[in-house]
Amino acid sequence: MERLGYYNGTFGPLDEMTVPMNDRVCWFGDGVYDAQPCRNYHIFALDEHVDRFFRSAAALKIEIPVTKDELKDLLNSLVQKMDTGDLFLYYQVTRGTGPRKHFFIDAPANLWVTITPAGKYDGITPIKLITTEDTRFFHCNVKTLNLIPSVMAAQKAEEAGCAEAVFYRPGERVTEGAHSNIHILKNGTLYTAPTDNLILPGIARAHLLRACEALGIPVKEEAFHLSDLFDADEIIVTSSSQLCRHACEVDGKPAGCKAPELYSKIQTYLIDEFERETR
């Protein structure tokens, strides 16, 4: 199968799948999700993503209808049905199906999965960024389905010919990207926003921090600001779909790309890890 969809035990070609209109995702975006890459039919960082998925669901008091091990077994079995082993997995759980009422309903949660061919990854070519005010709510640490601010920011970046939009809060504190985590290198040290309620604790972010530890690169988990972003030696963008990229431009001005050897060292470590774990 080239593109697969799964819904509560039923699966088939993604374009042929249907879901009930009364699924609360349609009314409220009432659910959480996670996503990750797969190579050679080996799902990368499966335990870490599934653990975060369950944490997100617990934060919204959604009871996932399978155990962690059952979900991992399901994902591994669905991957084997695909034409290629180089894939991108997305899965979400919604609160259930029932009449439109804002308060919780007494119904089992719905489990969705989609599996599609993986896009091309290139962590070498520098990308362009734009900045935009972070107008999202204060539960950014929960991977909910309420993504309208991220959608609007991503469209703003697309229209500007940029790969990502960088969010900042009042006081110009940089939080994260529309669909990524943002980090900077300065004087040989990696700075990354703390994992408070203003950012998603990215799995790729965690792998970046472990890479820096292995490589002897100091890490500071503390807030940084737009002025720091523009003054950085390197601006690093991490996500599950694009493990590690760096930026050369922000808001149309040159930025980053001043420590290519150090960035290459980090990026090579992460790619080697990915290829080793999915060999």
Image (cartoon, rainbow, N blue to C red):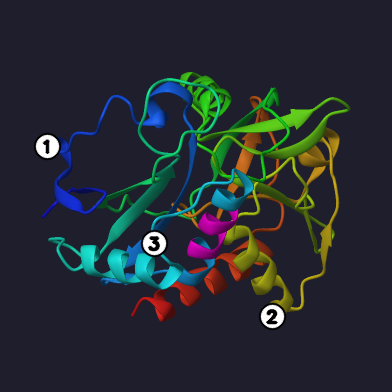
Q: Split into 4 quadrants, where in the image is the C terminus?
A: bottom left
Sequence-wise, which precedes: disc 3 or disc 1? 1
Residue carrying label 2: 214
**At which x and y percent is residue 29?**
47, 29
> Residue visible at 39% across and 62% down?
66
Does residue 132 lie above or below 265 as drawn? above
Query: Separation of disc 2 and disc 1 at Cα?
Result: 46 Å
Depth check, mark 3 against mark 1: the one in front is 3
Q: Give the residue furthest to the front.
A: 106
Task: Point out the tag, 2 or 1, that comes first from the N-terminus.
Answer: 1
Which of the 4 quarters of the picture holds residue 259? Answer: bottom right
Marks 2 and 3 close (CB-CB < 8 Å):
no
Quarter of the figure with residue 168: top right
* Vertical relation: 166 (above or below) 7: above
Please give the label number shown on residue 16.
1
For label 3, the residue is: 66
Q: Nearer the viewer, residue 112 or 153?
A: 112
Three-letter amino acid code at disc 2? Answer: Ala
Q: SS for tag 1? A: helix
Mark 2 nearby-residue class (10 Å; few <14, some 14–19, many ≥20):
few
Q: Amino acid at mark 1?
A: Glu
Q: Does residue 39 sit above or below 90 in this rendering? A: below
